Image (cartoon, rainbow, N blue to C red):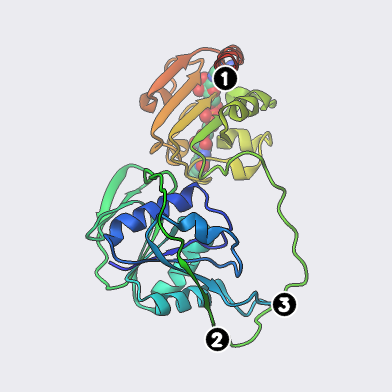
Amino acid sequence: MHVLVDLGHTRQLRSPDHELLTLARTLAGGDPVTVLSHEPQPEGLADELAGYGVAALLVPEQEAADLSLTDTALLDAALADSGATLVLGANDADTTEWFARLAVRHSAAIITDAVGVAQDRTVTKSVLAGGYTTTAEPTTELAFVTLAPNSVQTEEVSGGQAPQVKPLAVTVSGPAATVTGTEAAPASSRPKLTEAKTVVVGGRGVGEDFSLIEQLADELGAAVGASRAAVDAGWVEHAAQVGQTGVTVSPQLYLCAGVSGAIQHRAGMQTSQTIVAINKDENAQIFEIADYGVVGDLHKVIPQLLETVRARKG
Ligand SMILES: Cc1cc2nc3c(=O)[nH]c(=O)nc-3n(C[C@H](O)[C@H](O)[C@H](O)COP(=O)(O)OP(=O)(O)OC[C@H]3O[C@@H](n4cnc5c(N)ncnc54)[C@H](O)[C@@H]3O)c2cc1C
């Protein structure tokens, strides 16, 4: 099977990219894997791809001075160039939009938020707020699949050849808009909430001061999340909300404190691999799905946890 991996605007491989490449290599079964970068000069990326069985790294021939070169046009050109039948990408808003547009254009199947893809292109995904796991098989020759973070066990790659970098010439119809200025979003040293391997979440029980949650997250190299009650109270920004009307996370470790475990919250976290809950109410719903539970006041439990983590780290 010929697989095309769309890495979007990645300049340096991140954890979700390694997952996509590991999956692509497995599915390709020795056939060439093609990778598309939307960055014209992704320095060092070709070397990072060595070992993943990537035959070619496609890049735009030049940076567009305006918005005429759309990400969709670029991906369409990469599709034509590679002849891929399966296109894999990250399950983020941008990639999902590009894939959806091209799926319509090519009358192809699209499955988003997958947690696994088998050799016969059967895709596994969790639906209805994590209540069911389903499998779906594309019936079209071409299929687009976005992969949820933390779905694939990445493999260390060593050796192997860096792929050939191939500039893609894309014909565009003229500027749809012109960029008049750009401003980088403020960078955070914490991992991205949806991609983090460890997430520390605080609920209403934490109170206005979220510093304990933040300290614990920083000690564990984790992202900070929150329940809607904490977000609605204005203690945490909305981007941190986990749940039905927030983001869905599926980390290796989900640690929450002062969260009751309402169904709408669980919808966004119940596929986490290991769930640890701290709550002073032993009947809190969160304990129904927790792998480990601590019944106690979080303002006493978290400082002890911090002390232990710091002592272990030396
Ligand atoms: C349409 C809709 C969409 C929604 N979407 C979301 C969503 O996306 N995400 C979401 O989270 N919610 C969502 N909600 C809200 C949801 O129903 C709950 O109200 C919310 O999740 C409760 O947040 P909480 O667990 O922080 O607060 P609470 O339910 O008030 O729970 C607080 C918990 O903290 C414990 N506690 C208190 N003090 C301490 C202490 N000192 N130490 C330890 N434990 C303590 C309490 O025992 C309690 O269990 C949605 C609701 C609706 C109707």
| Mark toward the start of the polypeptide (3 vs 1) | 3
Query: Which quadrant holds residue 156?
Result: top left
| Residue at mark 2 | 171
- Local SS, label 3: loop
Residue toward you, 97 or 297? 97
Residue at numbered disc 3:
178
Residue at position x 56%, y 74% from top?
60
Secondary structure category for the residue under label 1: helix
Amino acid under disc 3:
Thr
**Relative image position of residue 270 (x, y in whole percent):** 40, 36
Which amino acid type corresponds to the residue marked 2 in the rendered image? Thr
Residue 177 higher or lower than 54, as above or below: below
* Disc 1: CA contacts within 10 A as few (<14), some (14-19) or many (>=20): few
Q: Residue at x 77, y 72 (%)?
A: 180
Q: Residues within 10 Å of mark 2 (few under 14, many from 20)?
A: few
What is the quadrant of residue 221 in the picture?
Answer: top right
Tag shown at residue 238: none
Q: How far apart are marks 2 and 1 (CA)?
A: 54 Å
* Number of the label disc, if any, that sits on residue 313: 1
Quadrant in the picture for the N terminus: bottom left
C-alpha separation, residue under disc 2 versus residue under disc 3: 17 Å
Residue 309 vs 271, above or below: the answer is above
